């Protein structure tokens, strides 16, 4: 039998840990989608991921997402011209997971399956207007600053439900839930608090019927804390360094160049 590649081995390990965490939480492992964060990865590795059945890919910088998507498309097209069986490019779902500036949104919209990082009314309004121009309704999550670190991107807990209602009224955006990032800390109870508070806001949104039946996603958990996130109800975990090695720099802080 052929030896597994390092990536295939890592993926098996991560999938196993996701399933175990779900079962421990008495949840169906199928409720949790693995989103591979590709910020450090080349197109060949992304192609391998697709062939291993991972179709949800995340990037935290808009230009990089556009570039990666184009590189991947080119690679897949080139290979299929040579008659190799390839994962269908149209199955790839790109997720924008990092802080988004309004003036960088436009080229993303035709490519994107979901934006996880809506953190202001102005950004939502801009996306709504741009989405109208290309006749799409874009699935979005609102990013919650549940750990209430002052420098971090995300909507304050106290402002969340109101902003979610406003987003819900925009015809070209479909609000589907919340995204959050926990603190950089070894303190498990702090991390858990961030996730459980996010779930509470999510429940409150549900109670207000925001998003209707489409309100079903909690994007939370990264390489270091995804098991805890699953125990608190995560439906999407965003994993980079654990799959690909290396230490990708996460956008823990809002960029100040807007
Ligand atoms: C980089 C990044 C991740 C993945 O982080 P890892 O610790 O490498 O798994 C997840 N979410 C966001 C928003 C990121 O920027």
Image (cartoon, rainbow, N blue to C red):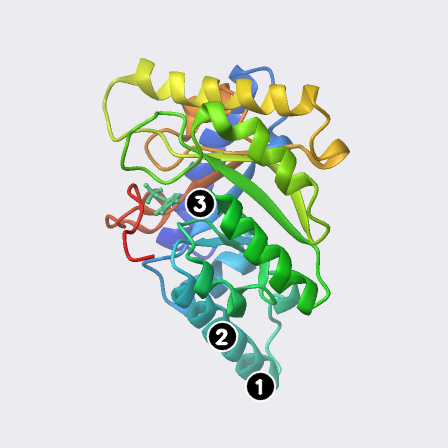
Relative to residue 134, is residue 93 depicted above or below? above
Cα–Cα span, label 2 and label 3: 24 Å
Say which residue appears at 24% left-offset and 48% top-offset. Answer: 247
What residue would you read off at disc 1?
82
Residue underneath mark 2: 70
Determine crowd level at label 2: few under 14, some 14-19, many 20+ residues with C-alpha closer than 10 A.
some
Query: Disc 1 versus disc 3: distance between alpha carbons?
Result: 28 Å
Across and down, in percent, residue 89 comes to 61, 68
**What residue is rendered at 68% in x and 69% in y?**
134
Label located before the other in sequence (2 or 3): 3
- List x then y, in percent, for residue 81: 60, 86
- Find out whether the residues at labels 2 and 3 contact each other: C-beta distance under 8 Å: no
User: 94 left or right of 43?
Assistant: right
- Point out the tag, 2 or 1, that comes first from the N-terminus: 2
Label 2, label 1: how far apart the Cα atoms are: 19 Å
The residue that mark 3 highlights is 11
Q: Residues within 10 Å of mark 3 (few under 14, many from 20)?
A: many
Image: 18 above or below 74: above
Q: Identify the residue at horizontal 49%, vertical 71% (top origin).
A: 72
């Amino acid at each position: 039998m052929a030896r597994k590649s390092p990536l295939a081995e890592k993926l098996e390990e991560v999938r196993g840990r996701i399933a175990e965490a779900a079962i421990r939480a008495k949840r169906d492992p199928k409720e949790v989608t693995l989103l591979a964060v590709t910020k450090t990865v080349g197109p060949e590795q992304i192609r391998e991921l697709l062939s291993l059945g991972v179709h949800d890919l995340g990037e935290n910088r808009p230009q990089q997402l556009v570039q990666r998507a184009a590189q991947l498309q080119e690679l897949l097209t080139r290979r299929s011209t040579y008659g190799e069986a390839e994962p269908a490019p149209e199955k790839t779902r790109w997720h924008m997971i990092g802080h988004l500036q309004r003036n960088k949104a436009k080229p993303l919209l035709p490519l994107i399956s979901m934006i996880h990082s809506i953190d202001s009314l102005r950004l939502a309004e801009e996306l709504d207007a741009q989405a109208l121009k290309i006749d799409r309704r874009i699935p979005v999550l609102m990013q919650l600053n549940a750990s209430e670190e002052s420098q971090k991107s995300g909507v304050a807990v106290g402002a969340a439900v109101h902003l979610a209602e406003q987003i819900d009224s925009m015809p070209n955006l479909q609000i589907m839930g919340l995204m959050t990032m926990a603190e950089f800390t070894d303190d498990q109870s702090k991390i858990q608090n961030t996730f459980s508070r996010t779930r509470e806001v999510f429940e409150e949104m549900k109670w207000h019927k925001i998003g209707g039946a489409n309100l079903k996603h909690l994007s939370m958990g990264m390489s270091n804390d995804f098991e805890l996130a699953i125990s608190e109800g995560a439906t999407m975990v965003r994993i980079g360094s654990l799959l690909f090695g290396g230490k990708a720099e996460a956008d823990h802080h809002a960029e100040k160049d807007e």
